[in-house]
Image (spheres, grey):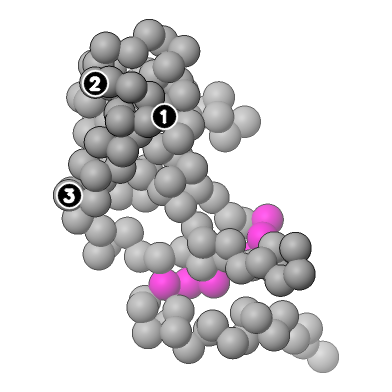
Amino acid sequence: MTERAHPLVEAVRELVDRMEGRIVAPEEMRGGDVPLVWEGSTVGGVRLPSATASAGDLESLLTGVADELGGPLKGLDRQEKQRAVRLLEERGAFAYRKSAETVAEALGVTRFTVYNYLNRIRA
């Protein structure tokens, strides 16, 4: 006997399929996934396809984080750059193709540094 999916998951399944996204279990969710919340509990998530994202979307995220942190990302100190990477991760910026390189350039650090910040955040 197979386990039935939560009614909310079933309700959005066709829409997610048409958007070429995918439904993931709560424990598989990562930054950028859209949580499906039912009565205060996350019952799943929707992962949208990153292939449809444009470079402009990533630039928009970078601009938003820079505005939120009060200035150009290159001018931030190390702690604030780590915070910027955390905010970008939470907003799904790293689902974009070659995003680590773009973020590294915006921050004025190496790609390796961005990956180090991400590893600390994800740990």
Give residue 28's position: percent from left, percent from top: 61, 56
Along the polypeptide, which appears first: circle 3 or circle 2? Answer: 3
- The residue carrying mark 3 is 56
Task: Using the image, determine if residue 92 lies above or below residue 4.
Answer: above
Name the residue rendered at 58%, 62% in the picture.
Answer: 35
Q: For label 3, count other residues whose C-alpha is less than 10 Å away and answer few (under 14), some (14-19) or many (20+).
A: few
Task: Using the image, determine if residue 96 lies above or below residue 14.
Answer: above
**Could one spot residue 15 in this view of the protein?**
yes
- In the image, residue 22 lies in the stretch drawn in magenta: yes
Distance, label 1 to label 3, CA atoms, is 18 Å
Label 2 element class = loop
Distance, label 1 to label 2, CA atoms, is 14 Å
Side of 47 relative to 123 (left or right): left
Q: For label 2, count other residues whose C-alpha is less than 10 Å away and answer few (under 14), some (14-19) or many (20+).
A: some
Q: Nearer the viewer, residue 69 or 48?
A: 69
Give residue 29's position: percent from left, percent from top: 58, 55
Distance, label 3 to label 2, CA atoms, is 17 Å
Quadrant housing residue 11: bottom right
Give residue 73's position: percent from left, percent from top: 28, 21
- The residue carrying mark 2 is 72
Name the residue rendered at 45%, 21% in the picture.
Answer: 82
**Label placed on residue 85:** 1
Label 1 element class = helix
Q: The disc labelled 3 sits on which kind of residue?
A: Gly
Name the residue rendered at 37%, 31% in the picture.
Answer: 68
Task: Using the image, determine if residue 88 lies above or below residue 38.
Answer: above
The boundaries of the magenta stretch are: 21-27
Quadrant housing residue 123: top right
